[in-house]
Image (tube, rainbow, N blue to C red):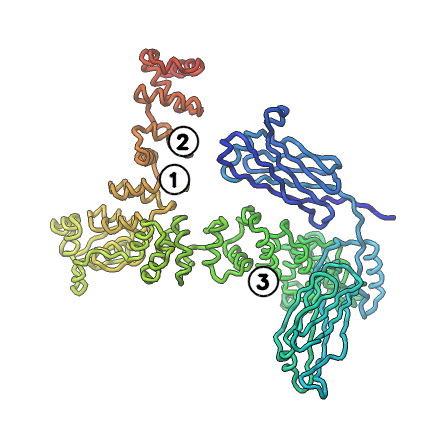
Amino acid sequence: MINVETKTLKSSATIPFVKSEDTKGKTLSSYKKSKSRVFPGQDEYEWWFNFCPAVNEYSSENEKNHVKLALNLIPAAEGRVTIEAEGLPTKTYDFPKCKYFDWFYVHQAEFYAAIEHVLVLKCTVEIDVDFVPKIRNFCPKPDVYTPLYDSMFSEMQITGLTNNLKVTKTLKDEINIPLRKSVGRENKFWNPETTQSQLELNSNVFRWSVTYVHDKEESPVSLIFIFCPNLIINVNARLTVEAEGLPTKTYTISNSGKFYFDHFPYQDVFNAIIDDELNLKCTLELTVDTNFVPEIRTEFCNYNDIEADFEIHRGDDHYKVHKVVLSKISPIFKSMLEHNFAKSSSNKLVINDFDFKTIKTAMNIVYGRPWGKISVGLALDVLYFVDKYKITDFFDELEEVLTSNLSMNNFYAILRYANECAKTDLFAKCAALYKDYEDTIKTAEPFLALPGPLVIKLLKCAFQFENELDVFYHARQKGICVDVVIEPSTVEIQTLADFLKVVPYAWKYYIEDLKVKCAQFYQQNKAEVEKSWEFQSYPKMMQQALSILGRPIEARTDFREYENVPTDFEIQCGENQLRVHKDVLSQISPVFEAMLRHNFVETSSNKIEINDFDFKTIETALNICYGRSCGDLSTELMLDILYFADKYHIADIFTQLEEVLTHNLSTTNFCTVFHCANDFENTGLFAECVKFYKQNKSNIKIAEATLPFPLVFKLVKSAYQLKTELDAFMHARRDGFRLDIEELEVPTLADFFKTVPYAWEKYEDGLKMKCAKFWQDNKDTVRKTEEYSSFSRSIKEELDVLGACFE
């Protein structure tokens, strides 16, 4: 009797949508179809789905207002389909056995509103199919015969537990063709006969032969290669021909048949024949897919007749084993047994970090016992168990399971295993899959959760990148977050090509550290850089920034003469001291001058304590004043120095750092620099910040923690020449961020008529109350205006109701 089982197959596909300028927020006019898909492990089932936008005004009401989705199945099947997208509800629909199924999803306006920039519609299909389990073909019996083996083998045939997993095997065979010089015939050689052989896999036989042909001396010598002449099949094979004195050549074979290949010119082959004979070695490598058949190891099968003397426990379950077997397969187990980590008195070992099924499967493989079903997830668990206990034998088959079943569904789990356990071949397979499906993988949540070093390693392997600069460049092109992929500080700019590659991205994404690196390269290689047409095409602002940022910050040189003069004063900051000169302090700062002149600091002590700035800030500020080179300064340190200079009125520092800060502005440091410019009333730096904000407002995140609301009002008003906070409020709302309603007033009649339509259209309850207060205070004046007459009845009634709160 044949047992028919029901199996659920699952597969997913996506369709991306980009908001079109032509649609004006009303319709989606494009028809989209997903790529054809097959269900993993069951490629006879094919499916795809279609997105159908709402149709024209002659359609039914539902069709007019709702987008329609359609599912196509070959052959017919029944199951369920789940649709999900960010910003839209997730919905699941059951469908009967059919080849075509369509349904209405959401209102078209709702669908379009969910598309901010890109919306990815994900369709997951599950179908229920009937299948007949296949019986596993087992390898021959072991040399060591035991009655227990017969019972094991019989049980395995009965249970027939298998996943019918496919593995890739490479078959290899060689043919040698002897070439000999012809006796009595000058400049002639010959080979005795056609040489043939065959490859075998299970019951399949692949016959092949090679003939070496040389009709004329002026023509190239040919190879006649015949592969499986009685079969019509597609294959993945290659023929390699090598001989001493001749270069090695490889020919690719993709199907059965008869092939003619040019080898080498006749004279080249003849000259390679030394001592009247030359052997051509022809190697055929044939890669085929075959059912995965786990081997039964014979080494420990004989222990099945010996009573076990040890147990491995996991929870309430245990597995009986032999100490001698554990000692042979694992140095970890051996050490634990020898040093009584596993108590010899109890003769058991408790393992809690793997489940019992994992332990049982691993030990069954060791003992050559039936495994049962082996999924990719179980294979991974077993391999982690094997890796922990350093069991180096028996488990090659499981790695083949991972290799042959690698898919988008298990990619991340296998990738992590390959990385953590240093499986280079398996990691390369994962990298190849990533390369083929990068656009899909790079946006997935599991990918975004991968640690940065692993992503770098994956990109390097997938695209054969030599250094992290190439990884960085590729990541930027593909929209992969650079903070995840690579730290800009690790990028080395060593060549002009590196420089020209990095500069546009450093400026486009406002990466401060990379800007400085580019500027340093520019200063060291100015002549070479300026000759390039790429540099000449850069905007003037970028060229100037490269020139400024590349120079170490140096102050006036007036005080360099003091370098050889003994110091006579000390600045104390915590446990650190800085030795300086009183004359220098007096000249750079009227505050220091007054303190020294009027004995705010005792002259006898020759010392001052400064505790409201850190030592690095004070030291760098004084080095600038002394004219010492300070190298590259971070934005944070420059801002601290400016606050120090502001407190002590050191004007010279401002003029030097302002220009650097202007060119060093980025989306990440904007708020702190703008706050600083406002605090110091530095009009030049303030204006540059306002200009930068207008150009990059969509990338700047403003929070109350970084900029207080009054300062945000000031920023928006300055950027757009707005007169009132009310104008700034409404402009900010249009730009997508909120300002505190408490900061607003409706002071004039013009403001009132400007605010009412906005407040009611946008449902701004706070603004409504502001308008209602103005209405209550100025009813008589407002009622006489034409604008008030144009208000709807509901607005007038609501103004009356809300205004009563202020009576």
Q: Secondary structure at mark 1?
A: helix
Under mark 2, the amino acid is Arg
Which amino acid does the dot numbered 1 rest on?
Lys
Q: Badge 2: how crowded within 10 Å, few (<14), some, or many (20+)?
A: few
Q: Residue furthest bottom?
A: 184
Residue 652 seen from this side = yes
User: Pointer 3: what residue?
Assistant: 422
Residue 38, above or below 257: above
Q: Residue at x 35, y 27 (%)?
A: 742
Q: Which residue is mark 2?
A: 733
**Distance from the alpha carbon under mark 2 to that under mark 3:** 52 Å
For the residue pair 326 and 638, the one nearer the viewer reads as 638
Residue 697's disc is 1
Q: Classify mark 1: residues with Cα within 10 Å, few (<14), some (14-19) or many (20+).
A: some
Locate residue 441, reporting x and y percent. 57, 49
CA gap between label 3 and label 1 equals 45 Å
Q: Does the rendering let one see residue 323?
A: no
Q: In which quarter of the view is residue 238 placed?
A: bottom right
